[in-house]
Image (cartoon, rainbow, N blue to C red):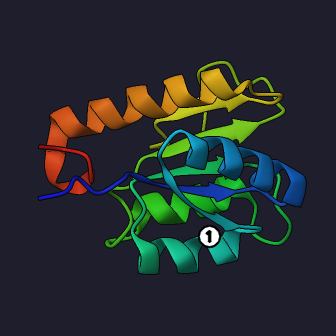
Amino acid sequence: MEKRKEHIFIVDDFDDNREMYAYFLSEHGFVVTQAADGQEALEKAVRLQPDLIIMDLSLPGMDGWEAARQLKAGEKTRHIPIVILTAYDLGNVGPAGCDGILTKPCLPDQMIAEITQVLDKYRKADGKHIAGAA
């Protein structure tokens, strides 16, 4: 049986940012989908069930703070790890229930390291939700 690639869902309102991160992550073997705002993120996360969401906080309409709260409260999405991607220095404090924080500008290697760490933590806790789990 072939191992399915892990699915990363990038939510950022800047097209260039999304495209850059999507390109880099796909080059590293991830399946990548994208959304430009919080409402689109909610709708796609329920439907696509990604393995991890990278969420910008400054989004038009529903911001990333509210989208992350709703995703973590949703029955069909609460199991999906969320890594915050922001230009603000939050220290270690992100939206409740979020699993990691990346500060922009984010170097590609930093993003891969954070994604790997969070996915590894979820594999150990509950492997059925992560595609690459044994």
Q: SS class of the residue under badge 1? A: helix
Residue 50: quadrant of the picture: bottom left
Is residue 42 rendered to the left or right of residue 47?
right
Of 47 and 16, the residue lying toward us:
16
> How many numbered markers are drawn?
1
Above or below for 50 versus 28: below
Of 93 and 110, the residue lying toward us:
110
Name the residue: 54% across, 77% down: 44
Residue 122: quadrant of the picture: top left
Residue 7: quadrant of the picture: bottom left
**Residue 33 visible at all:** yes
**Residue 95 visible at all:** no
Above or below for 89 versus 43: above
- Residue 130, given in percent of the width and then of the height, sits at 27, 50
Q: Where the N terminus falls, by quadrant?
A: bottom left
- Residue 64, given in percent of the width and then of the height, sits at 70, 56
Circle 1 packing at 10 Å, graded few (<14), some (14-19), many (20+), is: many
**Residue wearing tag 1:** 41
Is residue 122 rendered to the left or right of residue 14?
left
Name the residue: 16% across, 46% down: 127
Q: Where the C terminus falls, by quadrant?
A: top left
Above or below for 108 versus 66: above
Q: Which residue type does callout 1 highlight?
A: Ala
- Residue 99, given in percent of the width and then of the height, sits at 46, 36
- Residue 60, given in percent of the width and then of the height, sits at 86, 67
